[in-house]
Image: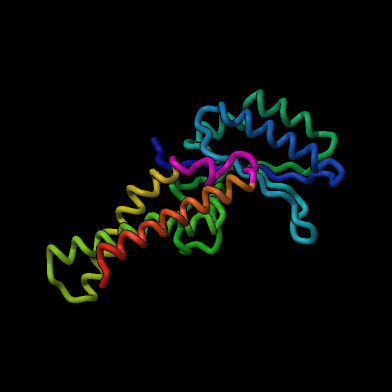
Amino acid sequence: MTTDGVAFVSTRWVHSDYEAQYRQWSEKIGAQLSVTPGFVSYEQLPAVEGKQDFWTQIVKFDTKQASHDWAHSSELAELLVEIEPYTRDSEFSSVRIGQQDWLNFGLSTKPGPGAPTKWKQLITGIMALYPTVIIAHEILAQLVTVPFALSTLLTNAIAMSLVMLVWLPQLSKLLGGWLLPTKPLPPATTIGVAAAILGIIGGFLLIFLQLFPS
């Protein structure tokens, strides 16, 4: 069984007079997806005047079969009929992606399908990486005495392994509704969770300043 997920991507032109109706229809899509087997995340990218005249929907599934079942489902077919009067030029495609593709630490110039916004990636990554690096460094220093360059390499190798293989998958589950919401979140929720993450980072800093003052 493959460990890769699949992003089901659809694009279409939406008449400007019906954008509000289309957004409401997109909420129906999100509601239906929430009870669809294999569903992981849903993202809506609106048209941008002067740059992109079509709307894009990105639906991530955990397997190719789940994506195929959704694409050929009667539920999707019925929902598509609703928007026929004010949309055209619909196109559909499936893109194979990794299960934990959302945090790339800047290695990619743009996020993959279904990836959170860069600023969410950044603060979540710092929250996971900062304490891991500090703790790994202190433990390593107690166990072995090695040159600075080698110590730095070992510390980063240990920290990144823990972050990528342990912390990020757990954070993806814990913060999934904030990182990849199925519909727009209230500003208070978006800001509140971000503030909590920054508060945790600040808490780590205060603790480490007390434990390691020099």
Q: Quadrant of residue 88?
A: top right
Q: Is residue 21 above or below residue 140?
A: above
Q: Is residue 83 left or right of residue 210?
A: right
Q: Main secondary structure of the magenta part?
A: loop
Q: Is residue 139 left or right of residue 56?
A: left
Q: Please name the residue shown 62% across and 28% down the image.
A: 32
* Residue 111 horizontal/vertical position (percent): 54, 56
* Residue 130 horizontal/vertical position (percent): 36, 61
Q: Which residues are magenta?
A: 174-186
**Residue 16 belongs to magenta span:** no
Specify the farthest residue to the left: 144
- 88 vs 121, nearest the viewer: 121
Specify the farthest residue to the top: 74
Q: Quadrant of the C terminus?
A: bottom left
Q: Please name the residue shown 73% across and 34% down the image.
A: 25
Q: Please name the residue shown 52% across and 31% down the image.
A: 66
Colouring method of the image:
rainbow
- 165 vs 136, nearest the viewer: 136
